[in-house]
Amino acid sequence: MSELILFRHLDIPDINDLDVYLANGGFKGLREIVGKKSPQEVVDIVKASGLRGRGGAGFPTGVKWSFLTPDVFPRYVVINADESEPGAFKDREIMERNPYQLLEGIAICCYAAQAQTAYIYCRGEFWDLAKELDEKIAELKDRGFLGKKLFGEKFDLEIYIHVGAGAYICGEETALLESLEGKLGMPRLRPPFPAAEGLFAKPTVVNNVETLANLPPIITRGADWFRSIGTEKSSGTKIFSLSGHIAKPGNYELPLGTSFRELIYDNGNGIPNGNAIKAILPAGASAPLLPASEEILDTGMDYESVSKAGSQLGSASIIVMDETVDISWVAYKTTKFFNHESCGKCTPCREGTYWMFNVMQHIKNGEGTFDDLATLNSVAESIVGKCLCALGDFSTMALTSGIEYFQEDFNAHLREKV
Amino acid sequence: MLQDNHATEIAQILERYPQASKRAAVMPLLFLAQREVGFISRDAINEIAGLLDLDPTDVGSLIGYYTLFYDKPGGKYRIQICTDLPCALRGAEKFSHEVCEMLNIQVGETTEDGFFTLEEVMCLAACDRAPLFQVQGKGGIQYHENMTLESTTAFIESIREQDANE
Ligand SMILES: Cc1cc2nc3c(=O)[nH]c(=O)nc-3n(C[C@H](O)[C@H](O)[C@H](O)COP(=O)(O)O)c2cc1C
Ligand code: SF4
Ligand code: FES
């Protein structure tokens, strides 16, 4: 097994206790920079590490920070803990089991971004977890790891929890900012990007929980060390949430570039009941499914390789499906999800997600005809690339790839039009 | 009135946001109101709107938009079973069906005694522990993971008993 960078609780079960965290190098990273390195130096280290955003888009983190409009203050750091992608449950484990590493990462990010205030936007269902984090933040304040004049230097920092109220779209960063401002969580037109006008119209960094939890070890062990893990363009480890038809579902932290085969068979102990594997959704409901050929199983799970294979790594929520699964039912489930979650702001997405679900329902009830497949494809076409946010595109992916690779599963429900 | 019972908490919530952007406190305040009685009343909406200089319709629209807010009372406990794709692959739809039969209701309905409302919801970020549900009741939201019909029945009975003793 490779080294655990994020899931240190698997080696040190009590690391969610501040003293245990401190005894194991906790807050060493923050101490190494506050008053000792300039914010720009920290940005450069993170750039050099090659760290990419773990929330889905894989954008280089240091580069994103360098887009902040210079000389405009206050600035904000917003942590995306909305985790609502079907099949994603990694941020929750970080926050529950290794919370101080996240909180230290947030502090490092704030220092680099020259922000004095951070908000953790936590999905509403994590109510109890948000309460625990709140207590941990108060404890850090008491112990001098947050608050005014940190370590006697010119750096003030407050972290607040903000709890969402159940809307997948609030994971999209601009919808999240709207929601945090107390409005309906609907995506904003861009530009301006959050780095110019984000929270309360101020320059803002939005990063995912897992992204920020990587910062303390990057600071203490250096960019070169981080780059030595993973692949050339996808450095570091990634937490893969493994779910569906798998003997041992759960989160697995592995170097980026690890093959699907290794994750599914070596870590997840393979498919239960002696069944054969049929298909994989590598990014929850939001990217094309892949037929589980030998070639796909040998594909590395890094941003480039999964994209070359015809899908996306996204947040690495790996849903495994065995031979008993009817892919048309999978499309029914994903279209149902997106119909429910479309925020309705743009017409192609609002109408399109409704129609795709409607037709899939029809097919599921045995009322579909062969013409429906063309209808589905043309509705999908009218959505892709024509929406304000990526949810529109996401909503078509499992459906159109399902029709492409497993049309026979759809055909089995269809008849000729009479 | 919220301000009668929760003045300190309200002040603490408002403190977290810049004065000029105090509207940001609206969701935390709605949660505070909902925690009181299980839904957000007309009076609470008006009070929150007043606190934040907002229009009550504006505040009301948030309740319709976000799935965790309710403007009507439901059962004392909302049992929300995840039947999204990853959980469904592990039998969550069948599980939901069995729980409905056990409670003698359909999805979306409330038991005759007004105790439980059963709902099916999207992914709760616990897909490796399916079947599972969250319970919204007094206070916060609790997860019940790796459930079976037996453990669910036991849970339902324990709640009924506990409530009878209060
Ligand atoms: C519909 C939609 C849902 C998203 N949900 C999440 C989410 O739950 N968590 C998350 O971190 N990013 C989510 N994202 C990505 C964010 O918009 C954003 O890219 C991310 O928070 C940036 O952080 P990172 O660079 O650290 O990944 C979502 C994007 C879209 C379009
Ligand atoms: S694409 Fe869909 S979810 Fe995104 S803004 Fe448009 S309507 Fe809303
Ligand atoms: S699909 Fe049920 S918790 Fe994720």
Image (cartoon, coloured by chain):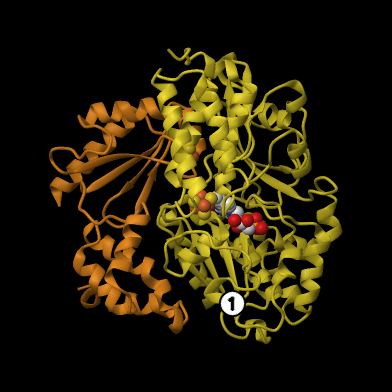
Chain colours: A yellow, B orange
| Image height of A63 relative to A263, above or below | below
Mark 1 lies within 8 Å of ligand 1 (Cβ measured): no
Q: Does B25 appear above or below A379?
A: below
Q: Circle 1 sits on which residue?
A: A202
A88 sits to left or right of A130: right
Which corner quadrant of the image does residue B113 belong to? top left
Residue A199 to residue A256: above or below: below
Using the rendered image of the protein, determine whether residue A270 is visible from the camera's viewpoint. no
Chain that bears disc 1:
A
Q: Position of residue A190 (x, y in %)?
A: 61, 64
Dot 1 amino acid type: Lys
**To which quarter of the image does residue A304 belong?**
top right
| Percent x, y of residue A288 | 63, 34
Q: Give the quarter of the figure containing the N terminus of chain A.
A: top right
- For the point 24% across and 32% down, the residue is B106
For residue A14, side relative to residue B6 (left or right): right
Q: Give me the residue at 57% from left, 20% from top.
A: A272
Q: How many marks?
A: 1
Q: Residue at coordinates 46% horizontally, 70% vertically from top-left?
A: A181
